[in-house]
Each structure stands twice: as structure tokens, then as C-alpha cells.
């Protein structure tokens, strides 16, 4: 890790706040609060991304008395946009250049750091924890995290890439989009969403041509194999194809999800917000996370110069 004394206030305070809350919460044990409730295992706190914690030890009466328990300095330049997660007493986060780190959440003691060798130049807002039974003590615990156009699977205990995932621990998100890799720019700037044994991701795409399509894709968390893809720019024979220019899927890009997703576990739907390459926002749409073939109609902006909205178009592939 390169040593530098420069630190951004945004990154410093983001991590410091979490440290203060989590270190206090580590000592809170009551009949109404479980150990799981004291963690922050998912970006946004839960699969619903509600940003809510049931902890009550810190409240409006004593928040002014909080003191710094520990600090962690990444020794890097740049903005720290990551929202760390806490699972089983371990805090996982990402540095400005997209090195992944694990700390003892109570003491701030570094446990491991993973450096892919790739210098990240895009924002990275978080990472994902997965275990075979969904618990902090489950078997086969891993961290799934984006580093530019790569999705890595790391051993949550050691921080080492898992060789059985993709190509020696990572998959290239530029692959499988039907465009040449040399002209495909994709960066995973927000954490994926977990549904059972799937990691569902979108990505940030180029906003000028050439640009790859913004497919929503689900990969097997164990092997890295593609399980399904939802084509936001429909292909022939898929729903909504006729609402786009002929063969649009061959040359129009983006219509991508870069801001993150949530999973409605009860109804097993995946609400997705997407942006067109012309920076027009689209309404949310529902994707069934296990097979991608279920969707609810919505409206989509055309990618032509016209500002008229067309009927919602979408597509799937198994």
C-alpha cells in the first residue's frame, strides 16, 4: 500500500461514523436485540436497502457524548465513497483505488488487504458478503466486489481470491455483452445484490458510442458462471423489440443500472433503476431474480433525439 498523508474529509468521516456506531453497538446485548441486528451485513443495512438499524443504545440524548474509538487511514488520495459492511464483528470496505480491506470492527485492527494490481479510477460504493447459509458463521464465506470491469470473489477470512470462481477468482464483466472487448467499457461502481446463490449486477457504461448494452446479469456466487441476463435493450423475439429502432441491440448501448439494486425477498422481484445513454432516467421495473423472465410493464425514454416516451421494452435470456 502506498503511503500518503492526504485524506479526504468525505471519506474520513464516512468511515469514522460507522466506527463510532459499531464499536458502541458491539457491547449492546439485550433480550430484544439479536447478534445479527448488531451487524450491517448488506449495503443499506438489509436486502431492502432501508438504511435502518434497530439498535437503541445511541439516541438523541447521548449522541453528543460519543467519542472516537479508533481510526483507519487508507493512506491514499481520492474520495472514499464506500459504505462498509459489518458481518460477524468484521468490517469490510474499499479504498479510493479499490483495494479491499477487512478490519476488526471493535478495535480497527487490520485483518487483511487485497490488492488486485488494478488501480481503480471509478467510484466504488460497496461490496457484498455471502455464505452458504446466509449467516456470519456460515461455510464458504466470501466477499464479492467490483474492481473496475472485474468482479472478484474473495475468501472472507483470508482475503485471497477463490480460484474456483471465474478465472482464478474473477470474471471480466465486459464479456458476454455481444460487443468487442476493446470497445466495451463497464465498471461495477455499486455493489451487486444477493439472491440465494446468485450475485446480480449492473454496471456503469460509457455514455457515448461505442458503448455495450447495460444488461442486468446474475452470476453463480460459487463458480462465476452466468445464470441469466436481462437485456435492457431487447433482442429479436423478445418483449418490446418492436418499440426500438430495427437492430438497435447491435449498436445502441447503455440503458444500464449503475446506482445499485434491491431484492424483494418476499415476492422475489428485483426492482431496477436504469439510465439511458442520453442521461434520461427510466422508471423502475421488476425482474424475477431467479430466472429474469418476469417483468412488470413500465415506461422507457427512447434513445433517439425525440423526447417522446415509448412503451416499456425488455428482454431476457436464460
Image: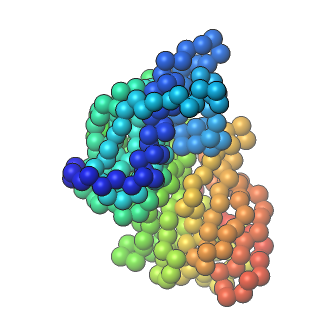
Q: Position of residue 299 (x, y in %)?
A: 77, 69
Residue 311 placement: quadrant: bottom right
Query: Relative to the observer, which residue lies in front, 120 or 137?
Result: 120
Q: Which quadrant is home to the C terminus?
A: bottom right
Q: How many marks?
A: 0
Q: Is residue 92 left or right of residue 55?
A: left
Q: Is residue 103 above or below residue 128?
A: above
Query: Relative to the observer, which residue lies in front, 317 or 208?
Result: 208
Q: Is residue 130 above or below residue 302?
A: above
Residue 55 placement: quadrant: top right
Q: Is residue 287 above or below residue 240?
A: above
Q: Position of residue 134 (x, y in %)?
A: 52, 30
Query: Relative to the observer, which residue lies in front, 205 or 43?
Result: 43
Which color scheme is applied? Answer: rainbow
Query: Relative to the observer, which residue lies in front, 49 or 8?
Result: 8
Q: Is residue 105 visible?
A: no
Q: Position of residue 259 (x, y in %)?
A: 57, 58
- Taking the view exactly as shown, the residue that stands out farthest to the left is 2
Q: Residue at x 59, y 22 (%)?
A: 57
Q: Is residue 316 above or below residue 224?
A: below
Q: Is residue 132 left or right of residue 45?
A: left
Q: Residue at x 41, y 63 (%)?
A: 122
Q: Residue at x 72, y 87 (%)?
A: 306
Q: Residue at x 21, y 51 (%)?
A: 3
Amino acid at each position: 500500500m502506498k503511503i500518503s498523508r492526504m485524506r479526504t474529509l468525505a471519506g474520513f468521516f464516512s468511515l469514522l461514523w460507522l466506527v463510532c456506531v459499531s464499536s458502541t453497538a458491539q457491547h449492546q446485548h439485550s433480550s430484544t436485540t439479536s447478534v445479527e441486528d448488531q451487524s450491517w451485513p448488506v449495503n443499506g443495512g438489509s436486502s431492502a436497502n432501508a438504511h435502518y438499524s434497530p439498535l437503541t443504545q445511541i439516541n438523541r440524548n447521548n449522541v453528543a457524548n460519543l467519542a472516537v474509538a479508533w481510526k483507519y487511514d487508507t493512506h491514499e488520495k481520492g474520495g472514499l465513497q464506500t459504505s462498509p459492511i459489518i458481518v460477524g464483528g468484521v468490517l469490510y470496505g474499499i479504498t479510493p483505488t479499490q483495494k479491499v480491506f477487512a478490519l476488526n470492527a471493535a478495535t480497527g485492527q487490520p485483518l487483511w488487504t487485497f490488492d488486485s494490481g488494478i488501480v481503480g479510477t471509478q467510484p466504488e460504493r460497496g461490496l457484498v458478503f455471502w455464505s452458504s447459509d446466509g449467516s456470519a458463521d456460515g461455510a464458504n464465506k466470501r466477499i464479492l466486489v467490483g474492481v473496475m470491469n472485474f468482479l472478484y470473489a474473495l475468501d472472507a477470512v483470508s482475503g485471497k481470491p477463490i480460484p474456483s470462481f471465474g478465472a482464478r477468482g474473477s470474471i471480466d464483466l465486459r464479456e458476454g455483452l455481444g460487443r468487442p472487448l476493446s470497445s466495451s467499457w463497464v465498471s461495477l461502481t455499486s455493489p451487486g445484490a444477493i439472491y440465494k446463490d446468485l450475485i446480480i449486477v449492473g454496471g456503469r457504461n460509457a455514455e457515448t458510442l461505442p458503448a455495450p448494452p447495460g444488461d442486468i446479469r446474475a452470476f453463480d456466487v460459487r463458480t462465476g458462471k452466468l445464470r441469466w441476463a436481462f437485456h435492457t435493450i431487447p433482442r429479436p423475439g423478445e418483449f418490446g423489440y418492436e418499440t426500438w429502432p430495427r437492430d438497435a441491440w447491435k449498436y445502441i448501448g447503455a440503458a444500464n443500472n449503475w446506482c445499485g439494486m434491491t431484492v424483494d425477498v418476499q415476492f422475489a422481484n428485483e426492482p431496477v433503476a436504469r439510465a439511458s445513454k442520453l442521461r434520461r432516467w427510466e422508471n423502475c421495473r421488476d425482474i424475477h431474480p431467479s430466472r429474469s423472465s418476469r417483468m412488470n410493464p413500465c415506461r422507457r425514454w427512447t434513445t433517439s433525439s425525440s423526447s417522446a416516451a415509448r412503451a416499456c421494452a425488455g428482454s431476457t435470456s436464460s
